[in-house]
Image (cartoon, rainbow, N blue to C red):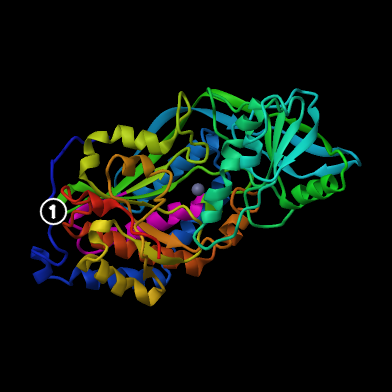
Amino acid sequence: MQRTLFIPAMLLVCVGGSDARAASGPSPEVVAAQLRDAAIAGHDIAYSWVSDLTTHIGPRPAGSASEHQAADWAAARLKALGFENVHIESFPMTAWVRGTESAQLIAPSQQPLVIAALGGSPPTPAAGLEGDVVIFPTLRDLKAAAPGSLNGKIAMVAQRMVRTQEGAGYSAAVPGRTDGPNEAAQRGAIAYLLRSVGTDNHRQAHTGTARYVDGRVAVPAFALSAPDADQIERIAALGQTVRVRLFSGASYVRDAHSQNVIAEVRGRDRPQEVVLLGAHLDSWDQGTGAIDDGAGTAIVTAAAKLIRDLPHRPRRTVRVVLFGSEEVAQPTPPGHGFGGHSYADNHRAELPNHVLAGESDLGTDRVYSFALPSRVAESEFAKTLLRILTPIGVLASDRPPEDVGADVTPTVEAGVPGFGLNQDATTYFDIHHTPDDTLDKVDRVQLDQNVAAWAALVWLAADSDIDFRPRPAAGSATAPPAKP
Ligand SMILES: [Zn+2]
C-alpha cells in the first residue's frame, strides 16, 4: 500500500509545546519513562520474537524460500500484536545460493583449510581450481600490483580487522571483501582469498557479500578463518610457495524475489508523518541470523509494540519496516534487489513526510549513546531524551549520526533525518556472518535495554511536532562537528 498525502513543509515547534493532550494526561517525558521501565522490566516480546524466528525458520538468505516464509511469519505476528496496515512489498532480485565448498593446502604440505565462499561469488570449475597464493597485507597493496602480475595465481589479502567499540574496524576492513575479488581479477588472478572480516580467532570463516562489477563477481572468492590465514602467512614467511585447491558449487536464481514487511501504529494527530524504525529480516545462510539481524527486528518490533499498547497513540505514525535482502545489497542493480532501495522507491512520494528514521543492525549488546540530527542536538528534545536514557547507561553522542544503517540509507539520502542508538560492537564481529550467529548469543537483559532506548526515543519523536530536518537557510547546520 502506498499513500500519496504530502505536505510541503512542517513547522518547527518545541517539544512540550501546544499539545492539547498534555493537559489531560501524563507528559511525553513521563510516558517515555514508563516505556523505558516497562522494557527494562522484561516484557518478553523481543526475546520471544527472535527465539521464534530463529527456531522455526532459521537462516533466511535473501531471495530464498526461507526468507519468504520469514516475511509471512512476521506479517502474521505483527497483525497478532495489533499493528495496523501490515503488508508485504515484494521486489525482484537474483538470489545467490551457497553450494558445497572446500579448500585444501596442497603444497608445501597437505592441510585442510576452513573457508566460506563470499556472497555473489561464482562457482569454481567442477573439478575445482588450483593456484599459488600471492599474499598482500592490505587491499591497497593488491591495488598497487601491476596488471597481469597475478596471471594464474590466487590473490590473498591478509588485512586484520581492528576491534573497536563503535565498529569502525569493520568499515576499514570490509573493502577487502567487497572490492578484493574484482581487483584481483583485473590483475589476472583466478581466485581470491581474504582473511575473514572479523575479530575472533576461531576456526570459522566470516562470509559476506562481494561487490558486483559489470553484473557479476569476477572470480571465485572465499573468506578464510583467521587461524587458516595465519597458517598460510607463516608458511609463506618461511619462503615456501603456498599452493591451494579451491572448490565452490555456488549458483544463482535469476528470477527470485525478496520483500519488505511493513506495519504501523497510526498517529492520532498527524498520521501522514512517519517515524521509521528499520531492521532486516534476511540473514546469512550458515548461522540462524540471531544477532544479524533477528535481534534488530525484535528490538524495533518490541519498541513499537510498547508504544502501540499505550492508552494514547502518539501524534505521528510509528512505522516498522523489516527489510528484505540487506546482506547481498548491491549499490547498483540491475536486477539485484535491495530492500532499502525498494522501500525508498515505493514510498518516494511520502518521504517528505518521514520525519525521522533509524535502524537496529548491530547485534544485541547495549546501547551506550544516542545521536540525533544536528538541528536538535542541543534542543529540549535532546535534553529530555538524555534524562530518560541516562539511568539505563545511555549518553548523548557528541557527533551526529554517521552510519544510520544500510537499509535506511536510501531513505536518509533522499533527505529524511536519521538518528542512531549506538550499540557496543566490541564483540559483535566475533560472530557476525559466521555459523556461530545463533540464539544462545542473545543476552535478554541487553536486548531489553535496546528496546527501552528505542521505545523512549521513538515515542518522544512521534509524540512531538519537531522538525528534525536541517534548517533550510543554514547549510552548515548539517556538517558534522570536528572531532575533539
Ligand atoms: Zn545486518
Say above or below: 21 vs 249: below
Say above or below: 441 vs 259: below
> Would residue 155 be found to the left or right of residue 337 on screen?
right
Q: At 77% across and 23% down in the image, what residue appears?
A: 126
Of all residues, the one furthest to the bottom in this rendering is 391
Q: At 66% across and 31% down in the image, what residue appears?
A: 184
Mark 1: amino acid: Asp
Find numbered disc 1 in the image and state the secondary structure of the residue it sits on: loop
In the figure, residue 147 lies in which quadrant? top right
| Towards the viewer: 233 or 439 | 233
Provide the residue span drawn in magenta.
Answer: 293-319
- In the picture, the quarter occupied by the C terminus is bottom left
- In the picture, the quarter occupied by the N terminus is top left
In magenta segment, residue 311? yes
Q: What x and y, as percent, mark residue 285? A: 61, 42
**Res 183 seen here:** yes
| Towards the viewer: 13 or 80 | 13
Q: What x and y, as percent, mark residue 357? A: 31, 50
Label 1 sits on residue: 269
Q: What x and y, as percent, mark residue 335? A: 46, 24
